[in-house]
Image (cartoon, rainbow, N blue to C red):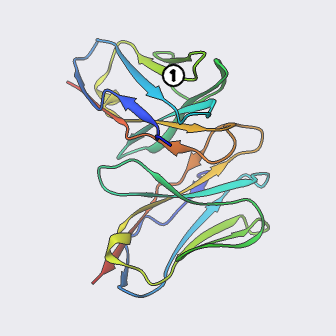
Amino acid sequence: KAGVTQTPRYLIKTRGQQVTLSCSPISGHRSVSWYQQTPGQGLQFLFEYFSETQRNKGNFPGRFSGRQFSNSRSEMNVSTLELGDSALYLCASSLSGSGEQYFGPGTRLTVT
Amino acid sequence: QKEVEQNSGPLSVPEGAIASLNCTYSDRGSQSFFWYRQYSGKSPELIMSIYSNGDKEDGRFTAQLNKASQYVSLLIRDSQPSDSATYLCAVNPPGSYKLIFGSGTRLLVRP
């Protein structure tokens, strides 16, 4: 069974720009969660989607948004990028959201 | 108080020894607990899940859960240099669909 895939793997953006990251979950998984990982803050929860509905949101500003499509694929968007948004963005999929979550390889975002 | 706490390490053990990694959590109602391994430059990999008090064994790994003490641990028997990584403890708070992660413990297994 194929794992979680994320595109692109690497991105370099300039402050003020916006970015869209994509995630395809494991086949049959309907829950997709997004996390941000930085050396200083560790792994922090951004949001979780199930059947195209956002069920949980972390403590991030409104510049961070996401959505899920009917095929369970998910995208997250960050607008008006700041230097502090440089991080590894991880997507994780699970059957229901409250059980085991499996991570994709991540997207490394660098904001200059 | 952090929601999930881990000693950052590094924890250094000789090859063949037992490595013991510990984690405490603050939400007493939490029901699901997970251990992830993360190699440098890679994404976290799920290695163990545990939901009930007691021990759960999978190969060289044993997860231990004590809900009364709000304590989760991971034992790695016969540690190998390839086990050198950061181990992340994660907790699913009650009524939510997110994982709260500890800051991770870096494990070094000396040949």
Name of the residue lying farthest toward the front: A1
Crowding near the residue tagged with mark 1, few <14, some 14–19, many ≥20 C-alpha atoms within 10 Å: many
Residue at the image point whose x is 53% and y is 36% from the top = A26
Looking at the picture, tell me which residue is in the foreground, B20 or A73.
Answer: A73
Residue at the image point whose x is 69% and y is 37% from the top = A96
Looking at the picture, tell me which residue is in the foreground, B76 or A5.
Answer: A5
Amino acid type, residue under disc 1 in the picture = Ser
Can residue B10 be seen here? no
Residue at the image point whose x is 20% and y is 24% from the top = A112
A51 sits to left or right of B60: right
Q: Position of residue A64 (x, y in %)?
A: 47, 19
The residue carrying mark 1 is A74
Can residue A44 be seen here? yes
Image mark 1: chain: A
B38 lies above or below A35? below
Q: Position of residue A39 (x, y in %)?
A: 35, 47
Mark 1 lies on a secondary structure that is strand
A22 sits to left or right of B101: left
- The answer to which quarter of the image holds residue A14 is top left
- The answer to which quarter of the image holds residue B26 is bottom right
Looking at the picture, tell me which residue is in the foreground, A64 or A95.
Answer: A95
Q: Position of residue A60 (x, y in %)?
A: 51, 26
Residue at the image point whose x is 77% and y is 38% from the top = B95
Q: Position of residue B72 (x, y in %)?
A: 64, 67
B48 lies above or below A81? below
